[in-house]
Amino acid sequence: MRLHARKVIILGLLVLASTVGAQSLLIPMDLEQANHLKAYGVAFWVLEQGVNVEWLLNYRGGSFLIPATSALERVCRLRGVTCQTVSAGDVASAYNTIEANNMERVLLEKAPKVAVYVPPNFQPWDDAVTLALEYAEIPYEKVFDEEVLAGKLSQYDWLHLHHEDFTGQYGKFYALYRGAKWYLEQQALYEEIAHKLGYKTVQDEKKAVARTIADYVNQGGFLFAMCSACDSYDIALAAQGVDICAAPFDGTSVDPDAQRKLDYDKAFAFQNFTLISDPLIYEFSDIDTTPRTGTSPRGDLLDYFTLFEFSAKYDPVPTMLTQDHTSVVKGFMGQTTAFKKSLIKKTIIIMGEVEGADEVKYLHGDFGKGTFTFYGGHDPEDYRHEIGDPPTQLELYPNSPGYRLILNNILFPAAKKKEQKT
């Protein structure tokens, strides 16, 4: 017994000595990083290998600290990601800096399984999140209405909503594109899916999808949405059982009492909004702040939004979601560019807004056991994205602050849950 205990002690000391003397790899996320977007993919790759990653919130732009291996260094080199080998003493010094400042260490433990909600005819360049995933080399699977209504969302940790219309109004493209080949094909496809699934109208089917996604979040899922998927989704939840589509979309008139029948309690983020049911107006409601002129009132060159600085130790979740190498991010437009602050529920965490304006770009909230994040705009590096525009080449924007916010959300589900200090 004593000999066995002595061996255990000696083995323990050897392990401790090897740990103390071990080197780590720091992936800086400040201005020294050559490729911020690929760095997220490297962190994801490490998690896939069953190795934990430390996310150093607010430390050098939200850097990653990982046990050093030759394989990891090779992956960084091949992907053009800046990394630095650091000693145990360097790590201890970094920990001291983190402890003394508005910084925090968050352990990432498991690579989340990612799903992107997209239609069957989807092209990757149609959606900024898919562009980010493919460029960062983060694996994902595609799901659409059939998979959602069949209960398959339980297989995934994180779900992104493509810039979809959950109200059944085909994106409100009727005014400009109702005779276009792609519009007619989309309408036919959506009607075919709805009828196949047993629904009379696309409106009814999309609202059922919205409810099922809400159930997924309520059970602990992580939801991320951009552009029109944000407001059209909340509208669909609030308008359950209410006809809000004009005749060109479903063959029946809008319920004349639709506005009064909205149940804002069912919506995730927005309240007291007013529907815009006119099929000739390219808006779902007054949630969106997009000017009808298609230009920012500040002018394109001055269109920026500011990220909030949160307490890393007391509010690690919004701190994770706002990690960036700048606190001021270039704006970008979309069908839903940003959200009116006055229509956002008081329980919602506002993470990015236009200073001095009733305009929120980036928000986060809880729903049941899960969370959701809404991000206004279509593509962070395509300021005024229009139908037919060429795809964004992220090779030209490896340090995009706007795209970093997307990738923060993808790593967020991997974080080890901590007790809230507030």
Image: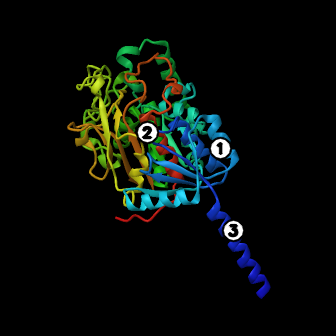
Quarter location, residue 299 = top left
Q: What is the quadrant of residue 174 in the picture?
A: top left
Label 1 vs label 3: CA separation? 23 Å
- The amino acid pointed to by label 2 is Ala
* Residue type of the residue flagged with mark 1: Glu
Circle 3 crowding by C-alpha within 10 Å: few under 14, some 14–19, many from 20: few
- Residue tagged 2: 225
Indicate the secondary structure of the residue bearing disc 2. Answer: strand
Asked whether disc 2 touches disc 1, contact meaning CB atoms under 8 Å apart, the reply is no
Per the image, the residue denoted by label 1 is: 73
Locate the C terminus by quadrant: bottom left
Q: Nearer the viewer, mark 2 or mark 1?
A: 1
* Depth check, front residue: 373 or 239: 373
Spot occupied by residue 131 in the image (x, y as percentages of width and height)? 53, 30
Say if residue 144 shows up in the picture: no
Considering the image in quadrants, where does the N terminus appear? Answer: bottom right
Q: Nearer the viewer, residue 61 or 156?
A: 61
**Horizontal relation, residue 16 to residue 225: left or right:** right
Tell me residue 239's x, y (percent).
34, 40
Give 30 or 381, whichever is nearer the viewer: 30
Mark 3 → mark 2, Cα distance in angstroms: 45 Å
Residue receiving disc 3: 15
Front: mark 3 or 2? 3
Q: Name the residue located 39 percent from the left edge and 51 percent from the top edge.
A: 318
Residue 57 location (% of width, % of height): 44, 52
Above/below status of 139 relative to 334: below
